[in-house]
Image (spheres, rainbow, N blue to C red):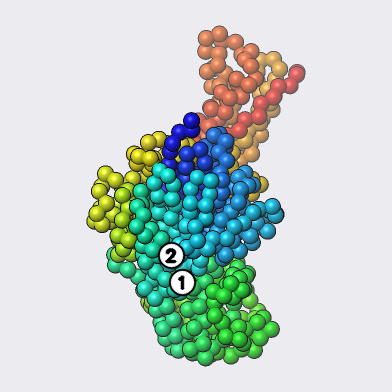
Amino acid sequence: MPEQKLRLIPLGGCGEIGMNMTVLQVDEKNYFIDCGLLFPDASLPGVDIILPEITWLEEQDIKPEAWLITHGHEDHIGSLPFLYPKFPVPIYGSPLTLEFIQGKFLEAGINNATFHTWVPGETVPFRNMRLTPFTVNHSIAHSLGFFIETKHGNILHTGDFRIDYDPPEGSMTHENIAKVVGRKKVQVMMSDSTNSFSKGTDLSENDLSQGFEKIIADSRGAVVFCAFASNIWRYQSVVDAAVAEGRRVYLLGRSMVRNFEIAERLRLVKCPAGLMVDDDEIKRMPRSKLVVLCTGSQGEPFSGASRLAFNMLDKLKLDANDTVVFSARAIPGNEKSIGQLVNQFSRLGCRVVTAKEADCHVSGHGYQEDLKACIRAAKPKHFMPVHGEYRHLKKHIELAVECGVPFENCFLAENGDVVSVGPEAHGVIDRVPSGRDFVIKGGIVNSMSDVYRTRLGLAQSGLICVSFVLKERGGELACRPQVVNRGVPMPDSEIEKKMPQALERAYASLTKESGKRDVKLDDLAEELRIHVRRAIESRTNYKCMVSVLLSRVGT
């Protein structure tokens, strides 16, 4: 008889912000909740994208029943083009989320996927559980939480959320939680921890329009709003402010244009006819009548904002009369690139407005009062914080305890932890392999693989390659060693001078007992590599990568 179990196994998003992915085990069936990515920082040269490691899933031959997707942000869907081919099962998501996923699959050449659309409040039966999606307030439209019912207990998963008290969605997160739970019991609540240190609650998305109107009214020239292309609600705030101030809107950035078209088609944005400016009109538009909504809020190269800042667009060039608004938070690690972009706009003479100067951004993640309101609405028996670094998870547990959840009923889990939540909730009971896989040019490698360690070593330490040609008899050098130096701060001539001594030391190490120089070529090559590296380290004070090519010639 199969083991009776209800388990949660995070493979991403617990102990870090981003790369969210959790395995839900209900008896012998498995379900994957979200499939996100991380973007690399400067410490990971050569890495394009970071994916959740799936070694354990492949080793255990785990076949999921479905992908259960909460919303369309990259940290929840970005890994799907890479992992779906390995786990080709139906994908469940909201309309906007599925539009984004289908666009990614089209670019990746995936055309055999099966999609099912969530309808908030409508329960979907699976083989051994029932799932009811419910609407949550977030910085992207069609964001959902899940109420999962099983014979071993019920799980409430909030997804990413906040509480917006004047919500574009038309309903509020905590009220939707109370409605979907009703009189049923919540065995464990999984809750977004991103802003667990932020006190109080944030402004409403609808509050921004009034602030945007003032910024536009105070500007003589064009006003540029840099925002996330996925923030559909921000589109509406900018559109409303432009209409109020008698201006028209120009979209800049491929993803911004594409997402705006999707948002209009799904009736998520209300845009008056004739408001949008096309490419043919932009040069003729008076600057005092123009609002630009563009990508590049994180300082991305070649984004709309970057092209504007560096005067790469003939059709639109900014000057001292124009205003640039950064209507987004800085993702950790992007501060430097954003700062460079702000400096470049300042060189053009533009007025630059950030969240430090005006109310031009609201977070999509709940502050402490939002988090507590949702815990009180769910009344969970057990609590498991997710989507945050370790300190965020720990702080969220403190908030849950304030709301009446016993401390011993709170589970602090990190990636790879196996959390038992039913039939009896025992918390973390085991660990499975977890980590990161890196997308690099030409393929995917594990963060601990020899391939990536070698690439990292090349980037950080440089490479010395030395070719030794020995005489067949006596093992003496047949010619001067040839050196190829890539990135090591030491003259080639100096390296060459040290090579005969390195060769003698390698022989001495291998022949200290026999005194004979008839050693195996492979043994000598490895010993020589060690002594070459030592010779270079004694001069540079650090270890570089060393490769030795060794051959013999007859005399």
> Could you tell me residue 363's position as x and y percent?
40, 67
Q: Amino acid at mark 1?
A: Glu
Rendered image: mark on residue 35: none
> Could you tell me residue 502's position as x and y percent?
56, 26
The residue that disc 2 covers is: 136
Q: Residue at x 60, y 10 (%)?
A: 516
| Label 2 residue SS | loop
* Quarter that holds the C terminus: top right
> Could you tell me residue 59's position as x and y percent?
55, 34
Q: Residue at x 59, y 39 (%)?
A: 451
Rendered image: mark on residue 169: 1
Report whether residue 505 is seen.
yes
Q: Are marks 2 and 1 in contact (CB under 8 Å)?
A: yes
Q: CA distance from mark 2 to mark 1?
A: 8 Å
Q: Amino acid at mark 2?
A: Val
Q: Earlier in the sequence, mark 2 or mark 1?
A: 2
Report whether residue 488 is seen.
no
Q: Residue at x 54, y 60 (%)?
A: 118
On screen, residue 460 above or below 270: above
* Quarter of the figure with residue 8: top left
Mark 2 closeness class: few <14, some 14–19, many ≥20 residues within 10 Å:
many
> Could you tell me residue 333's position as x and y percent?
45, 58
Mark 1 closeness class: few <14, some 14–19, many ≥20 residues within 10 Å:
some
